[in-house]
Image (spheres, rainbow, N blue to C red):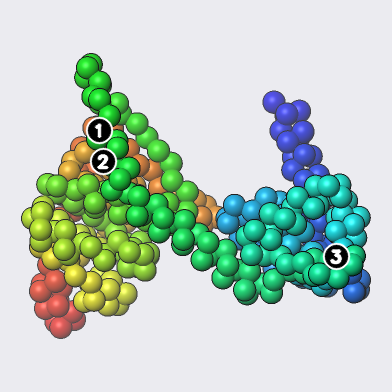
Amino acid sequence: MGLKADTRVKRLELEERERDSELVTLYGGRSRAVTSEGEEAEHLIPLNSIRKALMKFDLSKSEIRVYLFLARSGAMKAQSIAEALSIHRTETYKILRRLERQGLVSCTLERPMKFVAVPFDKALSNLIESRRQRLRALERRKEELIDLWRALPKLERTLSRSETLQILEGREQINVKAEDLLRRCRRELFMVVDEDYLLRLYNSTFFDNFGRLSKRRKFDARLLTNFCQTTSYILERIDLGEADFSYLDAEDDIPSFIISDNDELLLSLEREGGSLYAVWTNYRSMVKAFRSLFLLLWKKSTTPKARTLKSMAE
């Protein structure tokens, strides 16, 4: 076991050195050299952050390396790029053509032909707009795809309800799942959210349709949160529709969670380093336990009116 762990550590260290070596090439560019180890280390951090961000736009590592190298170095021939980044010339041409199609690189008409990176701010705009167009195209086909799915012949055998558990990483996935629970809710939606989670939902699109859905479907919607300036500010500005809210007891220190229709649970958690993740499950025993916890907290919570009177008395 110790040998395997040691091997993994060495492999990670090797990958990190290789990554830093690549970033040094990107930082140095064609026109200047890294002048000191301190300067090199200082600039590797933002370059690494940029590299990670670009990976979220479905760019490969090689495409990111070529784009960043060109953006730092100016117009260059494909042969020069291949030599600088140690990529085969044929593969370099393929990468450049893919970057052209994504609006990140253009080529000159001179001979020999040179390639130029689109300015970084414009490149980001192109990537974001491309993602938006794909999402709009999917949105336009949504109803069509749903109709196609419903038109499929039903299975003759009845599938039993399977109890599952899913781990969600990061704010985006958690917010999407929370909106999914709201969208499917028909009978009751119980929420316990601290000020940080309430703020994340407020900054997402979660509350955009909350009031409309609660009025139209008339489900039992209740929200519990801690009393502070942030939560008061948010609750004054969102449309809760038919939902009710109350304040947690000051001594309560519990994780944030959402329960939909006594059938699904979304439990928000935080790792030691501060990164967010959540657990979604439809395990009946877990959903039932957290629903009982919610009802207990709701029973001992403080109404907004009582909270105001208490604050005035203090």
Q: Name the residue under label 1.
A: 151
Which quadrant, please, contains the C terminus? bottom left
Badge 1: how crowded within 10 Å, few (<14), some, or many (20+)?
Answer: few
Amino acid tagged 1: Ala
Give the foreground label among 3 and 2: 3
Residue 207 placement: quadrant: bottom left
The span from disc 3 to disc 1 (Cα, nearest Å) is 53 Å
The mark nearer the N terminus, 3 or 2, is: 3
Q: Where does residue 216 sit, x and y in percent of width and height? A: 10, 58
Secondary-structure class at tag 2: helix
SS for tag 1? helix
Numbered tag placed on residue 113 in the rendering: 3
Give the residue pinned by disc 2. Answer: 147
- The first of marks 3 and 1 along the sequence is 3
What residue type is disc 2 on? Asp
Q: In this view, does 4 lie to the left or right of 295?
A: right
Q: In which quarter of the image is residue 313?
A: bottom left
Compared to residue 27, the image places residue 260 above or below, namely above
Which quarter of the image is occupied by the N terminus? Answer: top right
What amino acid type is highlighted by mark number 3? Answer: Met
Q: How far apart are marks 2 and 1 (CA)?
A: 6 Å
Quarter assignment of residue 299: bottom left
- Are dots 3 and 1 in contact, CB under 8 Å? no
